[in-house]
């Protein structure tokens, strides 16, 4: 087995039947109620607000994580790129993982902080 570089990469191996999304498929839309996050297993996902591309998330990256921390509507839309497969992590699974692997919460917070800084350049 290859060495796992991050907790998030380890999450990609959790689901034996990842969710396959066709290119252009909408995973969630801005304004939707969230209740899960996703880890990109293969391919990519574009995070957008309207027609503005915020970020392309590749394998081992996460999206929708804010919905597990704050119950507000989703702030962006997520659209699948080519060969996109995802691991879905709901609130219960996330809470269990954070209890067992506290470093995961820190890694998710780092992703959120990076995205916040990128969205609010000084």
Image (cartoon, rainbow, N blue to C red):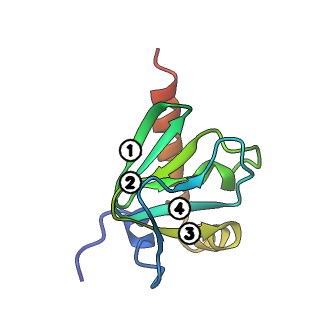
Observer-nearest of 66 and 33: 33
Q: Is disc 3 in contact with disc 4, using a CB cutoff of under 8 Å? A: yes
Q: Mark 2 and 1 residues: CB-CB less than 8 Å, in contact? A: yes
Q: Is residue 31 left or right of residue 22?
A: right
Q: Which mark is residue 81?
A: 2
Residue located 48% across and 45% down the image = 110
Q: Is residue 16 above or below residue 73?
A: below
Depth check: 96 or 39 in front? 39
Front disc: 4 or 2: 2
| Distance CA(mark 4)–CA(mark 2) | 14 Å
Q: Looking at this view, is 20 or 3 the one in front?
A: 20
Q: Earlier in the sequence, mark 4 or mark 2?
A: 4
Q: Which quarter of the figure has residue 85?
A: bottom left
Query: In the figure, 80 relative to 75: above or below?
Result: below
Task: Categorize mark 2 by other alpha carbons within 10 Å: few (<14), some (14-19), many (20+).
Answer: many
What x and y, as percent, mark residue 58? 35, 54
Measured as percent of width and height from the top left, residue 27 is found at: 56, 56
Residue 12 image position (x, y, % from top left): 41, 71
Q: Name which of mark 4 and mark 1 comes first in the sequence.
A: 4
> Is any atom of residue 33 visible in this view?
yes
Residue occupying the point 48% across, 80% down: 15
The residue to which callout 4 is attached is 38
Front-most of residues 111 and 16: 16
Report if residue 107 is visible in the image: no
């Amino acid at each position: 087995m290859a060495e796992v570089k991050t907790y998030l990469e380890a999450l990609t191996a959790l689901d034996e039947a990842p969710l396959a999304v066709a290119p252009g498929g909408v995973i969630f839309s801005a304004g939707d109620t969230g209740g899960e996050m996703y880890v990109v297993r293969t391919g990519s996902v574009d995070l957008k607000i309207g027609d503005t591309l915020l970020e392309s998330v590749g394998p081992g990256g996460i999206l929708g994580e804010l919905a597990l921390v704050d119950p507000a509507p989703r702030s962006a839309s997520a659209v699948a790129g080519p060969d996109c497969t995802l691991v879905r992590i709901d609130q219960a699974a996330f809470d269990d993982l954070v209890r067992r692997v506290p470093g995961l919460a820190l890694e998710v917070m780092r992703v959120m902080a990076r995205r916040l800084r990128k969205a609010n350049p000084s």
